[in-house]
Image: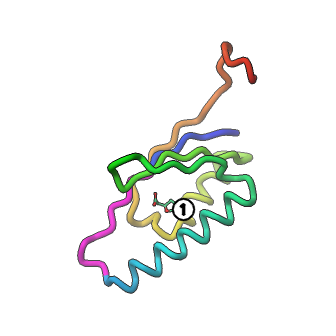
Amino acid sequence: MLYHVRMDVRIPHDLDPDVRDDTIAREKAYAQELQRAGKWPHLWRIAGEYANFSVFDVESHDELHQILSGLPLFPYMDVQVTPLAKHPSDINN
Ligand SMILES: O=C(O)C[C@H]1C=CC(=O)O1
């Protein structure tokens, strides 16, 4: 199942810089592990924003929720999820 996800990152300005840097480093490692596993096939920066558009390829709503809620930056994100269905005009489907 494919999901389009928009993540807007809103780290509080008063967060301890060491905590911020550690959280971002852990986020990167977690994101890259999921990409290598094929669960996070697209990750794009939205130009000019601290936000991304992503596509996740997972088995269920529950798996997606588990992945998203496990993001180290999850407490500092607004997340919008859009489930994707096949388009009848897409020649690849
Ligand atoms: O920077 C972001 O967009 C937030 C998040 C998503 C992957 C990652 O490494 O950080």
Picture coordinates of residue 27, whole percent (x, y): 53, 69
**What number of labels is visible?**
1
Label 1 environment density (alpha carbons within 10 Å; few <14, some 14–19, many ≥20): few
Picture coordinates of residue 43, whole percent (x, y): 56, 50
Query: What residue range appears in magenta?
Result: 7-15
- In the picture shown, does residue 19 fall above or below 10? below
* Magenta-colored stretch includes residue 73: no
> For the view shown, which residue lies furthest in the front direction?
47
> Residue sitting at 70 percent across and 48 percent down?
58
Give the dominant element type of the magenta stretch: helix, strand or loop: loop
- Is the CB atom of the residue marked by disc 1 within 8 angstroms of ligand 1's nearest atom? no
- In the picture shown, does residue 18 fall above or below 92? below
> For the view shown, which residue lies furthest in the left direction?
14
Question: Horizontal placement of 93 versus 9: left or right?
Answer: right
| Callout 1 secondary element | helix
Q: Quadrant of residue 69?
A: bottom right
> Residue sitting at 74 percent across and 53 percent down?
38
- In the picture shown, does residue 44 fall above or below 70? above
Question: Horizontal placement of 85 versus 5: left or right?
Answer: right
Picture coordinates of residue 21, whole percent (x, y): 42, 79
> For the view shown, which residue lies furthest in the top direction?
89
> Residue sitting at 51 percent across and 43 percent down?
81
- In the picture shown, does residue 25 fall above or below 64? below
Specify how the rendered protein is coloured. Answer: rainbow
Query: Mark 1 sits on what residue?
Result: 69
The residue under label 1 is which amino acid type? Ser
**Camera-side residue: 60 or 28?**
28
**Camera-side residue: 67 or 93?**
93
